[in-house]
Image (cartoon, rainbow, N blue to C red):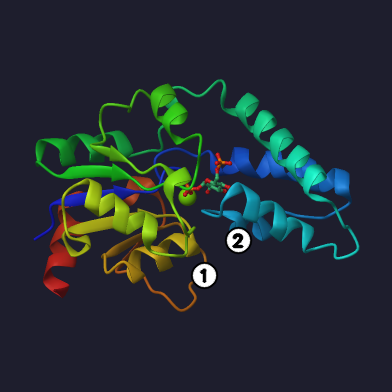
């Protein structure tokens, strides 16, 4: 029986994914590395440090020392913070507020499993701080997505087995993590699939129908 819902933040609750992209794009441009929105798909759900490494790998002759990398990470986050400064409840993605409300009144326990260190700040800006029963702190994790740890920890924080939760994600790394945690997965707007397939796929957040999702997932058990 499904008792909990575990949500990714960026790209599921709010569209900060575009802002992450713009902040990385400015760094990449300066380093003479070409990235576009399609290439950026691979950064979704990936930690800040790993994202920089993936960008740098595009230009093998661009060798930076630890200090220079640290500087770029700081700069990226400072620019990102500027870009999210204006976020309000109006930036909650379509259909999400209704879904969260329906889930609350349905008695589902809810958690955030985001790789972002800025998640608490963003939730506060969106006016959603009190909606979630738990927010996993990514600083306390040993592994990043696609490892299942963050999803296991989210279920644990809700006092539930992973099988009793449904995970919602907009990234390939996230879907893999959810599935490896033994959780049913809902994929939102992901263009291609690799090895790990979600249980349910929707094109956009506005297409999420909670009752239908829970019914489909329960039928599969
Ligand atoms: C998000 C984004 C990633 C970002 C990561 C770290 O993960 O999808 O692109 O690199 O958080 O964010 P920050 O630099 O704010 O710590 P998620 O898991 O919410 O999709
Ligand atoms: Mg995401």
Tags 2 and 1 touching, CB below 8 Å: no
- Which residue position holds label 1? 192
Q: Nearer the viewer, residue 46 or 169?
A: 46
Per the rendering, the mark at residue 42 is: 2
> Could you give the CA–CA distance between mark 2 and mark 1, rounded to whole angstroms?
11 Å
Disc with the residue nearer the chain's start (2 vs 1): 2
Res 185 visible: yes
Q: Nearer the viewer, residue 84 or 158?
A: 158
> What residue is rendered at 76% in x and 41% in y?
72
Horizontal arrangement in the rendering, residue 109 relative to residue 24 (left or right) = left
Question: How crowded is the residue under tag 1: few (<14 C-alpha within 10 Å), some, or many (20+)?
Answer: few
Q: Position of residue 7 (x, y in %)?
A: 33, 48
Q: Position of residue 196 (x, y in %)?
A: 41, 75
Horizontal arrangement in the rendering, residue 209 relative to residue 206 (left or right) = left
SS of the residue at dot 2? helix
Horizontal arrangement in the rendering, residue 164 relative to residue 147 (left or right) = left
Q: Position of residue 179 (x, y in %)?
A: 34, 69
């Amino acid at each position: 029986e499904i008792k909990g819902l575990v949500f990714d933040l960026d790209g599921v609750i709010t569209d900060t994914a575009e802002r992450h992209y713009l902040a990385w794009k400015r760094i990449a441009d300066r380093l003479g590395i070409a990235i576009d929105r399609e290439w950026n798909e691979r950064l979704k759900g990936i930690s800040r440090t790993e994202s920089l490494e993936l960008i740098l790998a595009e230009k093998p002759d661009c060798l930076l020392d630890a200090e220079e990398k640290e500087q770029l990470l700081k700069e990226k986050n400072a620019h990102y913070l500027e870009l999210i400064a204006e976020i309000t409840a109006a930036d909650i993605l379509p259909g999400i507020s209704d879904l969260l409300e329906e889930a609350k009144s349905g008695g589902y326990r809810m958690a955030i499993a985001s790789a972002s260190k800025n998640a608490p700040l963003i939730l506060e800006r969106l006016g959603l701080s009190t909606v979630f029963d738990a927010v996993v702190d990514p600083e306390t994790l040993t592994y990043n997505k696609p490892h299942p740890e963050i999803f296991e920890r989210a279920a644990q924080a809700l006092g539930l087995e992973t099988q009793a939760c449904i995970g919602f994600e907009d990234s390939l790394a996230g879907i893999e993590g959810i599935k490896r945690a033994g959780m049913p997965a809902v994929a939102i707007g992901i263009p291609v699939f690799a090895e790990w397939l979600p249980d349910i796929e929707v094109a956009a957040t506005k297409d999420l129908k909670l009752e239908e999702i829970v019914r489909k997932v329960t039928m599969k058990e």
